Image: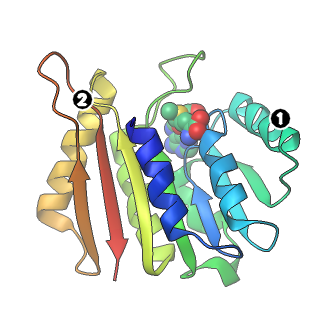
Amino acid sequence: MRLTERVHAALSEKLQPGDFAVDATMGNGHDTLHLSKLIGPDGKVWAFDIQDAALERTRERLEQAHQVNASLICANHSELEKHLPRDALGVIKAVVFNLGYLPGQDKSITTEASSTLAAIQSAIRVLAQGGVLEILCYTGHSQGLEEWLALETWISNRLPESVTVSIMSPYDATRRPPVWLEIEKH
Ligand code: SAM
């Protein structure tokens, strides 16, 4: 099973109809759609991206699936707290980060270590107790490797006491494998 599928399986176990969730990196909208289906018409998804192309692709994907419970926001995910309504703060059940660039678009427009770290810290603040952050980091490209090294340093030195972290990465002797980080708030 690919890591993206494992993340979706973990989200399926965690989320219930009526929950609130955030997609911090909307991209082509696969994660937004998955979240949207899991939480159903009584739930709400807030999805972020800095590129209009991502919002267009995600809007189309949601429309085709007749999903109407997502707000698509063109903004940096480091500012996510500014864009969430007050009643969502502290009750978000899951936040997904699928780091990197938008496939088929300019690869130089990619997530960056400093804003990713700021966004992760912000996401932890808005999580409910028992809520999770699911983060996929692709270390095979230089920006992704830089992000992973920054994340590792942050986990080792500045991880808040309110969370626990699990890290999973498939062994691959031929290339740097992607890393899946799950951060749970307790
Ligand atoms: N989750 C997506 C999906 O299901 O198709 C894939 C995400 S793609 C690998 C990463 C996305 O993060 C790109 O669309 C990129 O534009 C976006 N991104 C990069 N920097 C960002 C930032 N600071 N805030 C929000 N989105 C950002």
The amino acid type found where label 1 is placed reads Glu
Q: State the image coordinates of residue 32 (x, y, percent, origin top left).
A: 65, 49
Tell me what residue is drawn at x 29 percent, y 34 percent.
Answer: 178
x and y percentages locating residue 67 in the rendered image: 83, 52
Q: Is residue 102 above or below residue 165?
A: above
Disc ID at residue 114: none
Q: Residue at the front extreme?
A: 1
Write the residue at 51% across / 50% down.
8
Mark 1–mark 2 distance (CA, rounded to whole Å): 31 Å
Q: Residue at x 69, y 73 (%)?
A: 17
The residue carrying pointer 1 sits among few (fewer than 14), some (14 to 19) or many (20 or more) residues within 10 Å by Cα, namely some
| Viewer can see residue 46 | no
Q: Which residue is mark 2?
A: 177
- Secondary structure under badge 2? loop
Looking at the image, tell me whether mark 1 or mark 2 is earlier in sequence order: 1
Tell me which residue sits at (58%, 68%) in the image. Answer: 81
77 horizontally vs 33: left or right: left
Q: Quadrant of ligand 1?
A: top right
User: Residue 106 sits in which quadrant?
Assistant: top right
Residue 117 visible to the viewer: yes
Measured as percent of width and height from the top left, residue 164 is found at: 25, 71
| Pointer 1 residue Cβ closer than 8 Å to ligand 1 | no
Seen from the viewer's position, the closer of residues 14 and 90 is 14
Percent coordinates x, y for residue 161 in the rendering: 22, 80
- On screen, residue 85 versus residue 65, left or right, reads left
User: Which of the image's four quarters has the N terminus?
Assistant: top left
**Label tally:** 2
Q: Label 1 belongs to which residue?
A: 60
Q: Is residue 148 above or below residue 87?
A: above
In the rendered structure, the answer to whether residue 67 lies left or right of residue 11 reads: right
Q: Amino acid at mark 2?
A: Pro
The colour scheme applied to this rendered structure is rainbow
